[in-house]
């Protein structure tokens, strides 16, 4: 059996550019902490976008079932996509650990994964695991339908515009921890709402001009904004928060409410839960998934229950499923 030949070491994928090159600068310190914790590992630095995806897929197929990410949420997303496009093991038999050197750590907030390197290694050493749901989305890019898996959240409309601006600043080495927050305000006057129609489990639920919306599994994005405060990462459902057209003054006035989830009481906010979402817009709207800027509408979202085993730093509800293999979304 393939499981009998798996490599017990951790394979670590390091993004040297994460966190304004903290991945590169802090790797010697992280290595020292890992070694002191008696964690056996092999590591490779990513060299370009999508390299983490290819590395994860390659090394899982070589027999590694413990994959550690030293990077940000975008690196994690690539690794998840590598795991979900390999054919050797059920996806939920592979364990992911995270040492965050990015600016957001939004995925880790849901699971109690600390920012500090020593504390994060302590969590990995304890080995407490949790099986979370994983989302997938189909979208358009350069005239072709594409697909992507995501472990946290996908944002559309204004959220995607702010993420794209922030990502460009990251690529130029100019982004910091507050970049997303600042870009919320600096992008306000160049954004235009789109008329959008939303279907939940094939039932039309909303048709309106949309300012922003998110679909996901976990609670946080944008550097600590609680945009899906009621999401449960293993309940077999996707959650959606939609904010319809509102004044720019209202955005500025209520931004702080995004950080504690209290914004959901605003009259422009609608929340939905389901197994699948279809979103159509005119003109098309753009999307980010786990912070990575992707294509545009129409969007089709779906879910794979209990599909990813992750190291967590706090007590979570535990469910034991059967083996899970990723669907072939391109077929």
Image (cartoon, rainbow, N blue to C red):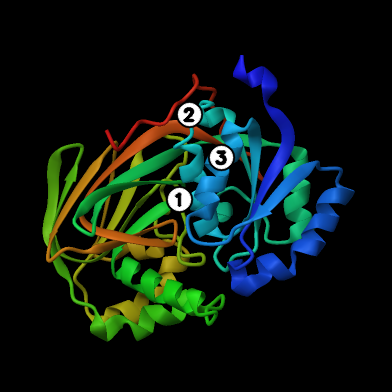
Residue topped by disc 1: 152
- Given residues 55 and 89, the one toward you in this image is 55
Give the total of numbered labels: 3
Q: Is label 3 in a helix, a strand or a loop? A: helix
Observer able to see residue 236: no
Q: Is label 2 in a helix, a strand or a loop? A: loop
Mark 2 or mark 3, which has the lower sequence index? Answer: 3
Apparent side of residue 251 relative to residue 21 in the rendered image (left or right): left
Task: Kindly report the distance in space between the C-alpha atoms of the residues bearing marks 3 and 1.
Answer: 23 Å
Q: Of discs 2 and 1, which sits in the foreground?
A: 2
Specify the quadrant that holds the N terminus: top right
Residue topped by disc 2: 87
Decide: is 11 above or below 254.
above
Task: Kindly report the distance in space between the C-alpha atoms of the residues bearing marks 2 and 3.
Answer: 10 Å
What is the number of the mark on residue 58?
3
Residue shown at the point (32%, 72%) measured from the top left: 161
Residue shown at the point (71%, 30%) measured from the top left: 7
Apparent side of residue 205 relative to residue 105 in the rendered image (left or right): left
The image shows residue 220 at horizontal and vertical percentages of 47, 58
Are circles 2 and 1 on residues that touch, CB within 8 Å?
A: no
Bin the neighbour count of mark 2 within 10 Å (Cα to Cα): few under 14, some 14-19, many 20 and up: few
Residue shown at the point (38%, 42%) measured from the top left: 135
Are circles 3 and 1 on residues that touch, CB within 8 Å?
A: no
Mark 2 or mark 1, which has the lower sequence index? Answer: 2
Q: Quadrant of residue 103?
A: bottom right
Q: Of discs 3 and 1, which sits in the foreground?
A: 3
The image shows residue 179 at horizontal and vertical percentages of 49, 78
Q: Quadrant of residue 280?
A: bottom left
Q: Is label 1 in a helix, a strand or a loop? A: loop
């Amino acid at each position: 059996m393939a499981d009998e030949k798996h490599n017990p070491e951790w394979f670590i994928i390091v993004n040297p550019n994460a966190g304004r090159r903290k991945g590169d600068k802090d790797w010697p310190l992280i290595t020292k902490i890992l070694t002191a914790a008696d964690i056996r590992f092999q590591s490779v630095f990513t060299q370009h976008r999508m390299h983490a995806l290819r590395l994860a897929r390659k090394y899982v197929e070589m027999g590694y079932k413990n994959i550690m990410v030293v990077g940000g949420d975008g690196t994690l997303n690539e690794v998840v996509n590598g795991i979900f496009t390999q054919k050797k093991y059920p996806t939920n038999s592979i364990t992911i650990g995270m040492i965050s050197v990015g600016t957001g750590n939004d995925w880790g907030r849901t699971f109690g994964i600390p920012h500090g390197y020593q504390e994060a290694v302590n969590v990995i050493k304890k080995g407490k695991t949790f099986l979370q749901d994983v989302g997938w989305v189909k979208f358009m890019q350069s005239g072709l339908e594409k697909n992507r898996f995501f472990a946290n959240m996908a944002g559309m409309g204004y959220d995607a515009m702010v993420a794209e601006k922030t990502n460009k600043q990251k690529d130029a080495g100019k982004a910091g921890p507050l970049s997303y927050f600042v870009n919320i305000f600096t992008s306000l006057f160049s954004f235009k709402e789109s008329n959008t129609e939303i279907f939940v489990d094939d039932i039309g639920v909303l048709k309106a001009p949309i300012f922003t919306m998110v679909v996901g599994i976990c609670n946080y994005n944008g550097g600590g904004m609680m945009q899906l405060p009621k999401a449960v990462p293993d309940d077999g459902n996707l959650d959606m928060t939609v904010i319809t057209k509102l004044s720019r003054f209202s955005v500025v006035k209520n931004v702080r409410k995004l950080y504690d989830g209290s914004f959901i009481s605003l009259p422009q906010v609608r929340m939905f839960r389901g197994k699948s979402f279809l979103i159509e817009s005119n003109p098309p709207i753009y999307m980010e998934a786990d912070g990575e800027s992707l294509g545009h509408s129409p969007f089709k979202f779906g879910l794979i229950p209990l599909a990813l085993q992750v190291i967590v730093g706090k007590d979570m509800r535990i469910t034991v499923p059967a083996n899970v293999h990723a669907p072939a979304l391109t077929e």
